[in-house]
Amino acid sequence: MAQNAEKCSFCRQVHSSDTPLIAGLDGHICESCARLAAQVVESWGRKRSVAKPLQKVPIPHEIKRQLDDYVIGQDAAKLTLAVAVYNHYKRLQAETAVIDCAMAAAGRVEVEKSNILLLGPSGTGKTLLASTLAKIVGVPFAIADATTLTQAGYVGEDVESIISRLLDAADGNRERAEWGIVYIDEIDKLARAGESSQATRDVSGEGVQQALLKLVEGTVVKIAERNRKEKDAGLLDTRNILFIAGGAFAGLEAILNRRMRPKNTGIGFHSAPDSDRGAQSDPDLFDQTRPEDLRHFGLIPEFIGRFPVITALQELDEATLVRILTEPRNALVKQYQQLFSYEQVELEFEPEALTAIARDAVARGTGARGLRSVLESLLKQVMYDLPSESGVERCTVSEAAVMGEAAIQYQYCVAGADADDREQAAG
């Protein structure tokens, strides 16, 4: 009887009450092999969907080098993102490999994702890093704003709308979307309200954090049908989607200072005031952030645990802002020079003028975002008058012009062969 017992044609498991077999025309298959076959077939479809980005996996050094072309400084954050994206590619490459029964029998290690939390003051480049990363990676990429999210059933967008955006970025291809990257901006705005406000529901803070828990860790999301190309696009697995969250976390400095600097308990004339003790701000303060600090800030412990990688962005100093003005591929100075070139005019900035612009941006306290506002206010009158002027060849911006002590100089090219140039102050 043992010799004639039915066996699985793949793993040779003998049919029993505990191991039922599915009979075919010329063989049988057990439940475990059927499940494995389903995974193999699914991997074929996913492999066809992501075959293009897998042709050449960019190494971390290459990813960081491309980030350096657009983002100045923040080497620690760029290194973290480069490693995360590279590992994301490697996981994708491993998951799309054909699985055979021998691998399943030997035991296969599944590499889990490591979501990233970016901390840093406003204007340090968090959103720019994420948007630049979208140009580098070959998987679908979506950016969502946490301030627009609310708990399900309330006015606003549900957390499932984030996956809908990712599916749109993948052109409706569910397999490609399941390997995408999502950046959630302004995540610090989800901090729950104070302990004293228990009477009202925090539907846009703690409620959104709780709704994001399963989405970030991995679950099957039902996507509302909006004329999708695929009939089965209604369900999407987020288990392999890499989530990157970023926020300014204004007020976290005070929490870090309270933990790292003991409270002044001295009394009398020789006791230093607390305001003097914390007057100097540490540029590397965010590097000391611990999960307990984020919990005191207002993030729930379950949400913090879903982001094991925490990296901080440094506040930009004057020298870094000068480099941001000139060095990146899309530097602001190059952008305005391109605008002036449309009028056949050359725009020049003296080195001292660039330093003065950076100094003004630091005084405004808005980081790199302040550079554009400084340049807009500085060049507004020139850009207004320039289309009405004729024969202007060059505009020169000096330090005095940035400080408002002089005007931007026009250099004219008079019609004729050897005519001398004449200069006139703008305005």
Image (cartoon, rainbow, N blue to C red):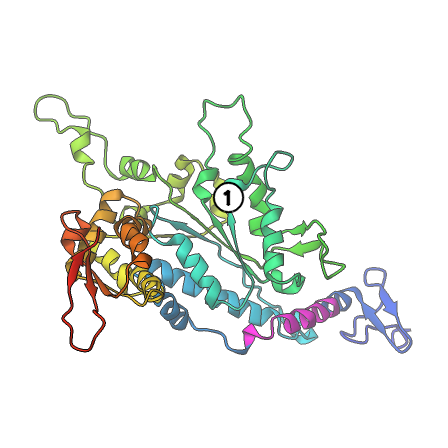
Q: Which residue is mark 1?
A: 146
Q: Is residue 47 magenta?
A: yes
Position in image of residue 40 (x %, y %): 70, 71
Secondary structure under the numbered disc 1 in the rendered image? helix
Horizontally, is 98 left or right of 320 in the view?
Answer: right
Q: Residue placed farthest to the left in the image?
A: 269
The answer to whether any part of residue 258 appears in the image is: yes
Which residues are drawn in magenta?
37-54
Q: Residue placed farthest to the front in the image?
A: 416
Horizontally, is 64 left or right of 375 in the view?
Answer: right
Position in image of residue 404 (x %, y %): 17, 47
Seen from the viewer's position, the closer of residues 371 and 183 is 371
**What is the quadrant of the N terminus in the image?**
bottom right
Type of amino acid under label 1:
Ala
Position in image of residue 166 (x %, y %): 59, 56
Q: Which residue is rendered at x = 46% and y = 68% of the image?
A: 136
Horizontally, is 104 left or right of 149 in the view?
Answer: right
